[in-house]
Amino acid sequence: MRLTLVIALALAACGGAASQAEDPALIRADGRAIDGDTVSFDVRIFGADAFEKRQLCRNTNGCWPCGKAAQDYASKLLKSGSSTIRLTGKQSYGRPIGTVEIGGQDLGESMIAAGLAVPATSYLKNDPERAQRYLAAYENAEARHAGVHAGYFIDPAKWRRGERLSCEARGKSSRER
């Protein structure tokens, strides 16, 4: 996967791909999901905050691995075609932030529409059109009870700070110690 990215960057640097040479912020590469909002080319998804890999959510059947579901869904979308990544020029957790499109479909918006991510509106202030789309996708997912909207969840940012549902273990797991 990384080799594909290296080749794409090399072609762009040499002027071998016209669209990439015209827009240095554009990268074309194949990818795979590390977790719901991070893909193998180490790009954080702009404006969408997906549930973390080990995060649990609750529905009528009890707790379920919504973070793993987010990762699996992102992976499925990424395997469906080549990705187009547009970097924002900003970084988060030491990784560049960018939008990812697969077949013209915005990955962040797809994750939100599936109920497996929430809009990160504080990051979308300079992109009101995307903010509007992401909020509409969220409201639609909520109305359809898609993904986490079929029950209860902790916002991913709060989960990263240590908040948990009553069915989740609190504190660090034995793997983290």
Image (spheres, rainbow, N blue to C red):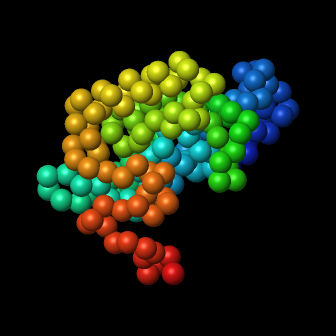
For the point 79% across and 39% down, the residue is 10
Viewed as shown, does residue 32 lie left or right of 154?
Answer: right
Q: Residue 90 at x, y = what percent?
A: 71, 39
Whether 176 is drawn above or below 92: the answer is: below
Residue lying furthest top: 129
Whether residue 72 is visible to the viewer of this picture, yes or no, is: no
For the point 31% across and 51% down, the residue is 153
Viewed as shown, does residue 49 lie left or right of 152?
Answer: right
Whether 31 is drawn above or below 28: the answer is: below
Whether 59 is drawn above or below 132: the answer is: below
Residue lying furthest right: 14
Whether residue 147 is visible to the viewer of this picture, yes or no, is: yes
Q: Residue 99 at x, y = what percent?
A: 58, 33
Question: In terms of depth relative to the viewer, which is nearer, 123 or 13?
Answer: 123
Q: Tag count in the figure?
A: 0
Q: Residue 1 at x, y = what percent?
A: 61, 49
Residue lying furthest left: 60
For the point 43% across and 57% down, the residue is 159
Viewed as shown, does residue 115 lie left or right of 29?
Answer: left
Q: Quadrant of residue 63?
A: bottom left
Viewed as shown, does residue 162 lie left or right of 8?
Answer: left
For the point 26% across and 66% down, the residue is 167
Whether 56 is drawn above or below 96: the answer is: below
Q: Quadrant of residue 13?
A: top right
Question: In terms of depth relative to the viewer, which is nearer, 125 or 77?
Answer: 125
